[in-house]
Amino acid sequence: MNKTPLIVTIIAAIGIILASITIANAYKYKFTSNENINVTGNALKDFDADLVKWRATYSRNNFDLKSASDQLKQDQNVVKNFLISQGIKTNEIVFEAVNITKDMQYGTDVNGNSISSFNGYILSQDVTIESQDLDKIEKASREISNLISQGIELNSSNPNYYYSKLEDLKLELIAQASENAKQRAENIATKAGSKLGDLKKADLGIFQITGKNDNEDYSYGGSFNTTSRQKTAQITVKTSFGTN
């Protein structure tokens, strides 16, 4: 009796069975891998800055370097006295190093040759104020322009506002955004007739700080508003949960 056809038949049957098991397992894996719930949690909080930095610059121009230096020194005393009169503490006031440049004017003569003329020395100095008394600094920044009437060439920048507990704020928002993501995922799982499983993946989004109620665009690298006293912080967390 020829057993070859029987053996071939058995081998073919085994192959079909193994192929079926492989396909079933592959389908099961594919089905399981698709049973993920991907959600993005969000958290935001309004807060007020608790630290202000403000900078002003004053300058003098004179052909004589010593005269310009003496004039700038007098201006420094006037500026310092003004700031102290506004209630600003001396340890909150920092005078930077004096910057000296030559005022040169360049042009050409009637023959087209390059010429230059010396118009004196320009001496400038920055004064920086850092304080936690925001109202006091805001008032001083508005009124310091009155010193111009005393002959001081002065340029004042707008105050910049910061928050000294920024890391604590970040941790708080990360926790809230994570909880928000979990709640969203649980709601999706419940509505789909399933149960939420373990967290499989979480990616932290960019931390953004914008002015409160300002129409600011978010930055790819993260916004960090310093011009507004009242701010809004926001962060997102992208998560992926399994299901049971």
Image (cartoon, helix red, strand yellow):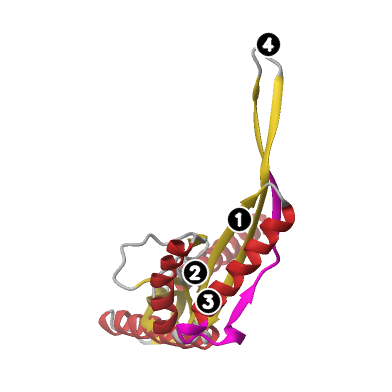
The mark found on residue 111 in the picture is 4
The mark found on residue 220 in the picture is none
Q: Name the N-terminal-most of marks 4 and 2.
A: 4
Q: Nearer the viewer, mark 2 or mark 3?
A: 2
Q: Name the N-terminal-most of marks 1 and 3.
A: 1
Q: Please tell me which residue is depicted at 38% across the width and 80% down the height of the picture.
A: 43
Task: Give how far apart the Cα atoms at labels 1 and 3 are.
Answer: 61 Å
From this viewpoint, which residue is outermost toward the right? 66
Under mark 2, the amino acid is Ile
Mark 4 in CB contact with mark 1 (< 8 angstroms): no
Q: Is residue 182 depicted above or below 201 in this figure?
A: below
Under mark 3, the amino acid is Lys
- On whether residue 95 falls in the magenta region, the answer is yes
Q: Name the N-terminal-most of marks 4 and 1.
A: 1
Mark 4 in CB contact with mark 2 (< 8 angstroms): no
- Can you identify the residue that label 2 sits on? 206
Mark 3 nearby-residue class (10 Å; few <14, some 14–19, many ≥20): few
Q: Is residue 230 visible?
A: yes
Q: Please tell me which residue is depicted at 61% across the width and 86% down the height of the picture.
A: 91
- Can you identify the residue that label 1 sits on? 60
Label 3's element?
Answer: strand
Q: Is residue 177 depicted above or below 6 in this figure?
A: below
Q: Nearer the viewer, mark 2 or mark 1?
A: 1
Under mark 1, the amino acid is Arg
- On whether residue 36 falls in the magenta region, the answer is no
- Can you identify the residue that label 3 sits on? 201
Q: Please tell me which residue is depicted at 70% across the width and 66% down the height of the picture.
A: 97
- The stretch in magenta equals 84-102
Left or right: residue 173 compared with residue 111? left
Task: Give how far apart the Cα atoms at labels 4 and 1 are.
Answer: 34 Å
Label 1's element?
Answer: strand
